[in-house]
Image (cartoon, helix red, strand yellow):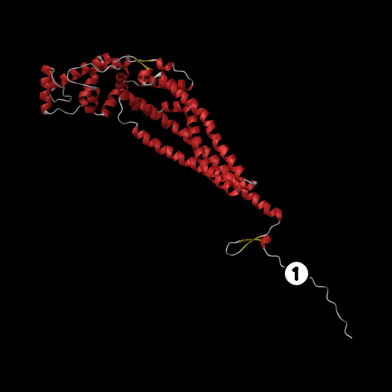
């Protein structure tokens, strides 16, 4: 029966660290998600603003479901980005989308996520202002922007110059987006791009925050429910390994020394397991960051950049929480082992047992030595000499 109890205890010892790993990860995730500081730290990062600024105008079009009306020459934002390069597009969009406009969107995002924590979704109904963006795409600002687009374009080949002349006279076919050495053709390119930018500005529509960030009220409520479920689960997950530790005590523990060794060893394994889990989470998040930028439209890519920034901000809180829990488990485990060793020494001193160590390292206790009987002889008598 005692052997069966030990086998069950060993099985439980292997299960407890796994359960404590899950519980520690869940608690760290909940503490991070429910902390408003996580969201504030994410949106304080100015690099995030620079990352999503070039995606703002394409995201507005995707959110409003209003594709650009047909414009002669087959111009499109994607074709423009491919021609001048994303870095140049980013530079020009920083002139169109002001820092104050992006800061206002950041404030909306912050209110959105903090509202989800409080079960408040009014931010999703707020509108996204587009008037300032429209003003920079039209008029003199639009013409200045068109000049910069042309200057960033590659130089025209002879064939492209010929195609540009044909397009100038007939408006048929695709407009060759390049920088011509002919002043007349270059002036026509600037005029054509100025007209295209004006149409882009006319078609920008004011959309709600829900459309712009591609997040519905139902999805926001789902996030709130997930957060609350995670809160309840974080308590339950710690009860299961606690119950298993109680079973280990029931099956095997017969003294305080035994308790210290079994429970201490289990907690040591659990602490090491939490550290391994933290390393795995960090590696997984690195892979997720690299996969987040693949094959998405502009609206999805913008929201993904925001989520990735939140995950980066939250990773610090998750790491701190898991390191604290792992350190606590390891410290208690070592403490129990040290206590068991101290109790063993005290028992030896209390019983007066002598312990000898041989040259080959074997321990010999005086209690295990054989008892050698001794003969008691009467006192010797002296015979007087006559």
Work out which residue is located at the far front of the displayed protein and give it.
Answer: 1
Task: Give percent across and percent down for residue 356.
Answer: 64, 61
Residue that carries the numbered disc 1 in the rendered image:
374
Closest to the observer, 150 or 75: 75
Closest to the observer, 367 or 120: 367
Residue 22 visible here: yes
Task: Give percent across and percent down for residue 380.
Answer: 83, 76
Question: Residue at the location (49% across, 30% down)?
Answer: 30
Task: Give percent across and percent down for residue 71.
Answer: 20, 17
Q: In this rendering, would 95 be left or right of 33?
A: left
**SS at badge 1:** loop
In the rendered image of this protein, does residue 279 appear above or below residue 352? above
How many marks on residues?
Answer: 1
In the rendered image of this protein, does residue 201 appear above or below residue 162? above
Q: Residues within 10 Å of mark 1 (few under 14, many from 20)?
A: few
Question: Residue at the location (57% across, 47% down)?
Answer: 4
Q: Quadrant of residue 77?
A: top left
In the rendered image of this protein, does residue 175 appear above or below residue 362? above
Question: Residue at the location (52% across, 31% down)?
Answer: 234
Q: Quadrant of the C terminus?
A: bottom right
Q: In this rendering, would 211 be left or right of 373?
A: left
Work out which residue is located at the far right of the displayed protein and give it.
Answer: 386
In the rendered image of this protein, does residue 164 appear above or below residue 259? above
Residue 36 visible here: no
Q: In this rendering, would 132 be left or right of 155?
A: right
Task: Give percent across and percent down for residue 285.
Answer: 40, 35
Work out which residue is located at the far bottom of the displayed protein and give it.
Answer: 386
Q: In this rendering, would 56 be left or right of 282?
A: left
Question: Residue at the location (44% across, 23% down)?
Answer: 222
Q: Quadrant of residue 88?
A: top left
Closest to the observer, 61 or 238: 238
């Amino acid at each position: 029966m005692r052997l069966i109890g030990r086998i069950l205890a060993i099985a439980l010892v292997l299960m407890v660290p796994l359960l404590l790993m899950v519980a520690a990860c869940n608690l760290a995730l909940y503490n991070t998600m429910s902390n408003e500081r996580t969201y504030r730290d994410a949106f304080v990062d100015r690099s995030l603003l620079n990352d999503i600024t070039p995606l703002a105008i394409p995201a507005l079009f995707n959110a409003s479901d209003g594709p650009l009306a047909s414009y002669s020459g087959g111009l499109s934002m994607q074709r423009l980005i491919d021609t001048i390069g994303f870095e140049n597009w980013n530079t020009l969009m920083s002139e169109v989308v002001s820092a104050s406009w992006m800061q206002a969107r950041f404030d909306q995002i912050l209110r959105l996520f903090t509202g989800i924590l409080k079960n408040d979704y009014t931010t999703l109904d707020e509108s996204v202002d587009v008037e300032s963006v429209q003003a920079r795409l039209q008029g003199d600002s639009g013409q200045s922007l068109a000049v910069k687009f042309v200057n960033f374009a590659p130089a025209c080949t002879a064939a492209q110059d010929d195609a540009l002349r044909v397009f100038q006279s007939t408006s048929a076919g695709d407009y060759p987006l390049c920088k011509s050495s002919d002043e007349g053709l270059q002036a026509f390119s600037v005029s054509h791009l100025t007209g295209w930018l004006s149409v882009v500005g006319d078609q920008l529509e004011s959309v709600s925050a829900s459309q712009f960030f591609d997040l519905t009220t139902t999805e926001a409520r789902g996030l709130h429910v997930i957060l609350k479920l995670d809160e309840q689960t974080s308590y339950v997950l710690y009860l299961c390994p606690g119950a298993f530790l109680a079973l280990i005590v029931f099956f095997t523990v017969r003294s305080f020394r035994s308790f210290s060794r079994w429970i201490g060893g289990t907690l040591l394994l659990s602490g090491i397991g939490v550290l391994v889990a933290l390393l795995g989470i960090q590696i997984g998040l690195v892979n997720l960051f690299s996969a987040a930028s693949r094959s998405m439209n502009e609206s999805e890519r913008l929201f993904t950049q925001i989520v990735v920034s939140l995950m980066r901000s939250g990773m610090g809180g998750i790491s701190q929480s898991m390191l604290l829990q792992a350190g606590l488990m390891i410290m208690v485990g070592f403490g129990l082992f040290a206590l068991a060793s101290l109790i063993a020494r005290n028992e030896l001193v209390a019983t007066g047992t002598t312990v000898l160590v041989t040259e080959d390292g074997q321990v010999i206790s005086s209690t295990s030595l054989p008892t050698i009987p001794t003969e008691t002889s009467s006192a010797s008598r002296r015979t007087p000499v006559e």
